[in-house]
Image (cartoon, rainbow, N blue to C red):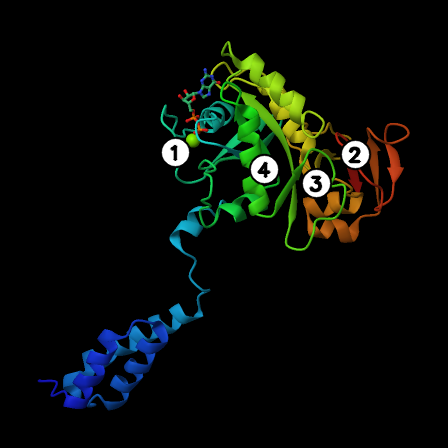
Amino acid sequence: MPANLTPQYLEAEAKFKQAKSVPEKIKALEVMMAIIPKHKGTERLRGQLKSRMAKLKEELQKKPAVSRAEQAYNVKKEGAAQVALLGLPNAGKSNLFTHLTHAPSEVADYPFTTQKPIPGMMRFENLQIQLVDTPPIQMDRIEPGFPNLIRNADGLLIVLDLTDDPVFQMEVVLEELNRMKIEIGDGNPAHPPEQGWVFKRAFLLGNKADLRNATEGLRALEGRFKSEWMILPVSAKEEMNFEEVKKEVYGRLDILRVYTKIPGKEPDLTEPVILKRGSTIDDVALSVHKDFAAKLRYARVWGSGKFDGQMVKRDYRVSEGDVIELHL
Ligand SMILES: Nc1nc2c(ncn2[C@@H]2O[C@H](COP(=O)(O)OP(=O)(O)O)[C@@H](O)[C@H]2O)c(=O)[nH]1
Ligand SMILES: [Mg+2]
C-alpha cells in the first residue's frame, strides 16, 4: 500500500535531515509524527519514527559529550594508587614505564612517540600500583585532558634525562605544572593550596644513569633541587634502582596495608587490605563487609598493639603491617 505522504510531512522530514543537534531533531521528528497520515500504508514508517524518537530521547539524557581527546586522558584508576610519569620528550618515560610494569609502551629514538596516556600495573611486594605513561610535556602546548590526568593522579614521578641539561628540563616541567595550577612537593604541603590549585607529591628520577656523562647532570640537579625533592638516579635500560623507586613511590602514597585473620587461623599475608592512612578498625571491618562494621564488638591486633593480640575498639587507628582479627 502506498504511504501517500503529504507535502507538509516531506517538508518536516527535510528539516529533520538538516537538524544538527539532538533537540532540533526531536522537534522535527515530533512534527513528522503528528502529521504523518495514519493508515496501514504508513504503519512501518510510524514504527521507525517511534524508535528513532526513543533513541534521541535517550541521547538527550546522557551527560554532555566529552571530546575524544579528553576521553583518552581519562585513565580509570586500578590497584592501590595511580602514579603518573611526567617529563620532556626523550627523558625515558616510556622506557621506564615498560620496565617497571612489563606492559608495552612505545619507546623510540625520536621525541613525541607517546601520544596518549597508557596505564600499566607495577608490582611492589604484595600490591599493585598503577603507573601511567604520558605524552611528553611540550612547551606552550597543553593537550586538553592532560591537566586533569595529572591532577587526578595520586602521585607523580618526574623523569629527567641526566645527560641533557636536567636542570633546564626540571625548570620547564615546573613552569608547565605552574600553568596547570599544580604545585608539587616531596612532603606535606607547607600551606593549604590556593583556590583552584592542587598539591601533588612527587620526586625526581634522573634517568640514563648508565651513560658516562650522567654524573655531571646528577650533580647539577642535586645542587639545584635536592632540598626540595628526592632525586633518584635510575636507568630504565639497566633497571637500576628499581626496588628503590617502588619503595619510595609506595612511601609517598597516603595508604597502608593491614591483614585480616580469622580466630585460630594464620593471616593471609599475600592479600593486604589497603586503606587510607589514619584508618581505624571500623574501616577495616567495612572493607571486609558492610555488615561486619555494624556487628563488630572488638578486634585483636598483632603489630602496632602494646602486645600481640591486644584487644582494641572500633576507633583504634591501625598501622602499616598490622594483623587484625575481627570479633563479631
Ligand atoms: N642509555 C639509556 N638510554 C635510555 C634510557 N631510557 C631511555 N633511553 C633512550 O632514550 C630515548 C627515549 O626514550 P623514551 O622512553 O621513548 O622517552 P620518552 O619520550 O620520555 O617516553 C630512547 O632512545 C631510549 O632508548 C636509559 O636508561 N639509558
Ligand atoms: Mg614516551
Q: Is residue 152 visible?
A: no
Disc 4 crowd rating (10 Å Cα; few below 14, some 14-19, many 20+) is: some
Q: Residue at x 16, y 86 (%)?
A: 40
Task: Please tell me the numbered disc located at residue 319.
Answer: 2
Residue to which mark 3 is pinned: 275
Alpha-carbon distance for marks 3 and 1? 37 Å
**Counting other residues with Cα less than 10 Å from the Cα at mark 2, is it few (<14), some (14-19), or many (20 or more)?**
many
Q: Quadrant of ligand 2?
A: top left
Q: Is residue 234 visible?
A: yes
Instruction: Check mark 1 vs ligand 1: CB closer than 8 Å? yes or no.
Output: yes
Mark 1 or mark 4, which is nearer to you? 4
In whole angstroms, how far apart are the C-alphas of marks 2 and 4? 34 Å
Q: Is residue 5 above or below residue 47?
A: below
Identify the mark nearer the N-term, 3 or 1.
1
Q: Are marks 3 and 1 in contact (CB under 8 Å)?
A: no
Q: Quickly name the residue at label 1.
A: 112
Question: Going by the image, does 303 lie left or right of 113?
Answer: right
Q: Would you say the residues marked 1 and 2 are in contact, meaning their CB atoms lie under 8 Å apart?
A: no
* Residue nearest the observer in this picture, 167 or 316: 167
> Relative to the observer, which residue lies in front, 141 or 52?
141
